[in-house]
Amino acid sequence: MGLVLGGLSALMFALSFPGVSWWPLAFVAITPLVVLAMRTEKPARSALGVFVAWLPALGYLQQFAWTSSVAGFFPLVLYTALYPAAFVWIFGRLCGRFAKRPMVCAIVIAPVLWTGLEVLRGEIVWHGYPWYLAGQPTVAWDCYSGTASVIGMYGVGWMTLVASSGLAVGLGSARSARRASRLAASSIALAAILGGCAIGSCATMSEAKSLIRRINTGPLVRIAVVQTNVPQSIKNEWTFEKAADDFARFLKLSQEVAQQQPKPDLIIWPETMFPGMALNAEAIEAQRKSGLGFRGSGQPLTVFYDALLEFQQSLGVPMLVGSEAIEGLKFITNEDGSVKIETSARYNSAFLIRGGVVAERYDKMHLTPFGEEMPYISAWPWLEKKLMAIGAEGMSFELRRGTSPTVFEVPIARHGRGTEERSAARFVAPICFETTLTGLCRALVFGGASPHDRRAELMVNITNDGWFYTWRGGRECHMQFARWRCIELGTPMVRAANTGVSCVIDSVGYVMDRRPQQWFKNADTPIEGVLTVDVPLGMGGPTAYVRWGWVFPWVCLGAGAILTMLAFVPRRGGSKSYATAGAGTNGAKSS
């Protein structure tokens, strides 16, 4: 039973995400697991079946990890499959304890427990891996996903699970469940969906009215995105010749958009697309003093830096560029003439260039687990080295976390068609997968002296989605997170993504424009190009989510922890029955 119902659940879950994008399945994907947990007499055995059944689906969804690190792919799939299995095991035991209250089990306990497990995975373990959450695909339904401005993406997922659990009770057999109970459960499921739509519609309409006002009368910032197309395999082995060719194309694309009328207020390049060593002043000075050049080219190490500054000054348009920042850079010449490079710290950073490189930069504050750091394992360098030799040879985990939530500022030339005046736009620049983290983005946009102070009117996400290779679903899924962040924070976002999807999202989560991709041999083949959009700044106050809605997932986590402890507390009388009476079960059976 665990393999069958677990397999059905996993199939619907996988099909609801980008790649296929049958998002309505999100409302029923977890239903088979709820039915299984409420019927089973052996939760542990059922959980094992679910664990096995979910492996193919999670392998399909996370196939991008295979090309990045074979050794990391299998642990990732095994790890993520633990969570649906844990849900069935824990919930199955709780159903045995509350056998006479099937409605409470299905409508209250199941959604809270699943949401708590999602928060555990998405925010805590391995420093957070929030991919493929139950409610994530529903961002496609505007009037429903708008609820995230009140209770966030986790809260929308909880509502989706209430609907799934209510349906599980409503599908109960006539022999063991009362008709009134099934009708009530079905009504609750429908109410969860319609209630979410009502709240979401009200929140979306309110923000939409404010958005229309800003478009008609408020300040606009004209953003130009340069979408590059540098395959990740080449980026890891960027020879000088290849880097010079790519750099020349980036400059040409930037020049094209800078010549548009009116001129853009800001040009954005994706993450780590600067081909030099670093852009911070300390590292540049060290490179100049070394007198070294690129092997076989005769060009100094600062050739790309010098060319970029000269180019930006000729354009007269500020540029946001992704590059490393290196501190304590030293070049040590060995006796054999070889050069050893030493550093005290390296960061994945975003730099603003306005006549020169602005000293204040943004260093990525949350490093991608197993992509930029080895969570926990990095505390033992010898173990990290061994693991990298097995399946991540050539990769380096030398990056450090940033500590300052930097806010950038650029002048804007256009102020809308009304009388409202504003001479500059403030923006923050979450890098790559940082947009998957709701707490981090909330702190960047609203984390000033008071948590309700707006620090920025725009989010700019620079990312290198070349990690997804030809997996279109991964790119689209990453963009979904950006849409959720815009809804939660009532703040627009511009994405500059190497290989795509580059796009502009307004403050209600609507994709205003995106860089197109070509369809070729059943895969989205990325193409380079430019995208220019006038973006209305997020001028409103904090959303309900920013004020208090962010607390909801942590309440679910705490409640889930209590429920888990309760599930494993020995029961009086030693009863081993876990099947429930009513709610579509075969009835409680005593041993």
Image: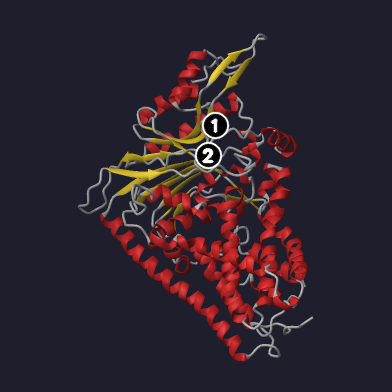
The residues bearing labels 1 and 2 have C-alpha atoms spaced at a distance of 9 Å
Identity of the residue drawn at 78% across and 68% down: 45
Residue 476 seen in render: no
Residue under label 1, please give it: 246
Q: Residue 469 at what x, y percent from top left?
A: 64, 45
Q: Is residue 433 above or below residue 316?
A: below
Counting residues from the N terminus, which is met first, the one under dot 1 or under dot 2? 2
Quick one: quadrant of the C terminus?
bottom right
Instruction: Judge left or right: residue 69 versus residue 283.
Output: right
Q: Amino acid at mark 2?
A: Thr
Quarter of the rendering containing residue 105: bottom right
Single out the residue that lies furthest toward the right: 591
Q: Quadrant of the N terminus?
A: bottom right
Q: Tell me where residue 172 sits by quadrant.
A: bottom right
Tell me residue 91's x, y (percent): 66, 70
Q: Is residue 145 visible?
A: yes
Question: Which residue type carries mark 1?
Answer: Asp
Location of mark 2 (residue) = 228
Q: Residues within 10 Å of mark 2 (few under 14, many from 20)?
A: many
Residue nearest the viewer, comparing 65 with 568: 568
Q: SS of the residue at dot 1?
A: helix
From the top left corner, tell me how far across and down residue 170 is, in percent. Answer: 62, 83
Q: Residue at x 71, y 90 (%)?
A: 175
Q: Nearer the viewer, residue 565 or 388?
A: 565
Name the image colouring.
secondary structure
In the depicted structure, whether residue 585 falls above or below residue 462 = below
Label 1–label 2 contact, CB within 8 A: yes
Secondary structure of the residue carrying tag 2 is loop
